[in-house]
Each structure stands twice: as structure tokens, then as C-alpha cells.
Image: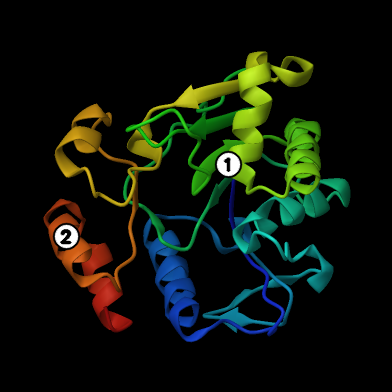
Amino acid sequence: MKNLMTYINPSKEFDQDYSRLVEVQIDNCRQMSWKDKDIMLVTNFPYSYGGIEAIVVPGKLFCRYRRRASKINVICHLLNNGALKDKCWFHDFDAYQVDTFPEDILGEFDAGFVDYATNNMWNTGSFFFKPSALDIFEAIRRVMNERRVNEEIALKYLTDRDVDGINKRYIKLNNTYNLGRMRQNEYTYRKADKPIKVFHFHPRMGELYEAVKPLLPEKLIQIMATHGY
């Protein structure tokens, strides 16, 4: 399995916030026993940290109307160019793995998505897919461009209408794989299978970070402290 993170910015550099988050992520991925060859950091500019070299892609993949939706353009680019040939976990820079994933997480399905737990909108801060899901991501991109919406709304559009039989091709995963920003702590935590697999929160949001900290592994807390959080 590959561990994919993407950052496309017209400035061709990490902003101050993400310059720390990317280092936290790489350190955490390594302590979660990911091999360097399986950590895929994709940017539109040269970057390296601790021996991890970014895969540089064209800046035209930046989505100007929904910048976070650039992730879909990057995934389509990687799959179309044969740069991603294994099943993959994609996650945002503020989504932290804290427990191992089952090898057969997708089973026979092409993709696995997580909703927000408080509603049925998809939360694309953490999801899994196989290379066979290329047409699903192409469809997401098509709807994004046609409707000028983000990737979550585009995916919801497709699954609500079962476009091209998409609903037979993905599995809805428990929110343990993307335990949201912890604003509805008790409810979302209660719904999540234990042990939690992925916590999704931003450490610069002090009150939020302090609320979730008792649930985090000490190793992750130490990594964040090393990088100023």
C-alpha cells in the first residue's frame, strides 16, 4: 500500500503552516512503520525532508475554484501516468494515522470512503483506493469542473445518483479511518470503531488539540512538540 499526500500551490512552496505539517506527517508515517518507498509526497515544486523526495507534478493540476480539490487532479494524473500501481491511502496533512490498517481493507471494492459521521456527506480527508478506481476519480473531476464544486460534493452527486454503477464499487468505511475534527467529540468518537485508526484535526487550533490530546499516542504528541505544536 502507498501513503499519498499532495500539495499543489501556485507559490511553488509550502506555506508556513504546511511547512511544519508535512514534517510532522513524514515523521509520523515512519514511526507507524511505513517504508520510505511507500510514502508518496506529491508537490508542484522540488522538496525533500529526511530523505523523502517529493514527486513533482505540473502546476496546472491546481484547482483554482476549490484548491483542496487539487487532490483529485493529482490522483488522476498519477493513475493516468502509471505512477501509482498499488492500492493507496490518501490523507490530508492534518489527518494522522495512529493504528495499523488491515491489509484487506478494500476487499473486492475499488475504493473506500468515509463520511462525517454527523451526516452522510463524504469526508475526503482520508480515503483508500486501487488503481482500478481511475474512472471514479475521472468522474469526480468531471462533476467538479462542470458544477464548480469541491470533490466531496462531486462524489456525493455521483453516489446519490449511482452514476455508472459507482455504488457497487466502493465500500463505506467506519469513521475510525477519519475521525473528524472532534467538534462533536462524544458522538463521533462513540460511532468510531476502536482502536481509532486516523485522527483528523489541526494542531494549531489550540483548544481543539488539547481536547483530543488525551486520545493520542505519546509518540505523535512528541513529534508535534518537536515541530512546535
User: Residue 123 appears at what percent x and percent y?
Assistant: 48, 41
Q: Secondary structure at mark 1?
A: helix
Q: Amino acid at mark 1?
A: Glu
Quadrant holding the C terminus: bottom left
Residue under the point 50% across and 57% down: 92
Q: Which mark is residue 98?
A: none
Q: Is residue 76 left or right of residue 202?
A: right
Mark 2, Cα crowd under 10 Å, few <14 / some 14-19 / many 20+, is some
Q: Which mark is residue 152?
A: 1
Is any atom of residue 169 visible in this view? no
Residue under the point 49% across and 45% down: 126
In this picture, is 83 found above or below 24? above
Q: Is residue 166 left or right of residue 122?
A: right
Residue under the point 48% across and 33% down: 121
Q: Upstream in the sequence, badge 2 or badge 1?
A: 1
Quadrant holding the N terminus: top right
Q: Amino acid at mark 2?
A: Lys
Q: Secondary structure at mark 2?
A: helix
In this picture, is 228 found above or below 198? below
Q: Which mark is residue 213?
A: 2
Closer to the camera in the image, 169 or 2: 169
In this picture, is 40 found above or below 165? below
